[in-house]
Image (cartoon, rainbow, N blue to C red):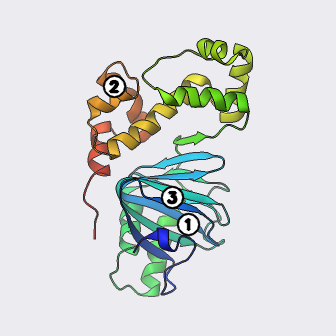
Amino acid sequence: MSISSQPDKLSDDGRTEAAFRFAHAETVPPHVHPLGHLVHAATGVLSLITDDGAWIAPPNRVAWVPAGAEHRHRAHGVTDMRVVYLSAEAATGLPSGPAVLAVSSLAREALLAITTPAPRSDVARSHLRAVIVDEVASAPEQPLHLPEPRDDRLRRVVRRVERDLTEPVSLAGLAAWAGVGERTLTRLFRQETGMGYRQWRLQLRVHRALVLLAGGRSVTEVAAACGWATTSQFIDQFSPLVGMTPGAYRRAATAAPRD
């Protein structure tokens, strides 16, 4: 069953949870759900994309999409996607906008259990959903969001950086290239992304690294492609943001889907 065929519907039997398989680079068109939902990649990696930017959800994270929020997904690597829809009452403690949250081992196992085809009573499913919500609602929001700028000047600069991450271009160099004052560009980054240029560029490199690792590229290859001078520097900067080393993440992202 592919979610791309029915992106805006719940499962046919009325259940409010489901599992879908995606091929590498498969995408889901923009759509809206009447219920908020948690999205977990049991294997592979999912991008959650809205007009406000992109969120990456590796296997140790869960993406939250509020009810009515238009969004689309893209799979990186063969992806086993698990979805749990929540009523407005159940979603009270979750963020008001799209977010990526840490997923504990307990919440992950509950997510996998509730989205498998094994028969379970309504009571059992309710207990599993309560565990998931309690665990996820208490987890901190993760810095895996890459905002999409609105200002045309900043959008032009962002596209310039995205084209080649191996080039260590400075903010001053970008300002000169774009014909924008350095102070103006600094202000635009803060206003539109909530980050300074260096932090934003690190987020961009980590996002690109997540995608490349999920596609099976080696840690060394990804470090070079994303502009890190050494593999050890890549590991040091990647691990705190993602919550695991690049090697551990690659193994989790490329593991065989679970039944």
Q: Quadrant of the N terminus?
A: bottom left
Q: Position of residue 224 (x, y in %)?
A: 34, 25
Q: CA distance from mark 1 to mark 3?
A: 12 Å
Which callout, 2 or 3, points to the residue nearer the camera? 2
Q: Residue at x 33, y 32 (%)?
A: 222
Mark toward the viewer: 2 or 1:
2
Residue 219 versus residue 1: which sits nearer the camera?
Answer: 1
Q: Is residue 151 above or below residue 7?
A: above
Say which residue label 2 marks. Answer: 224
Please report the residue visible at 28 percent of the width from the left and 51 percent of the height from the top.
Answer: 254
Name the residue that disc number 1 marks. Answer: 37
The reply, left or right, for residue 169 in relation to residue 223 is right
Q: Tag 2: residue type?
A: Ala
Count of marks overlaid on the render: 3
2 and 3 marks in contact (CB < 8 Å)? no
Q: Image quadrant for the C terminus?
A: bottom left
Q: Amino acid at mark 1?
A: His
Horizontally, is 153 left or right of 13 in the view? right
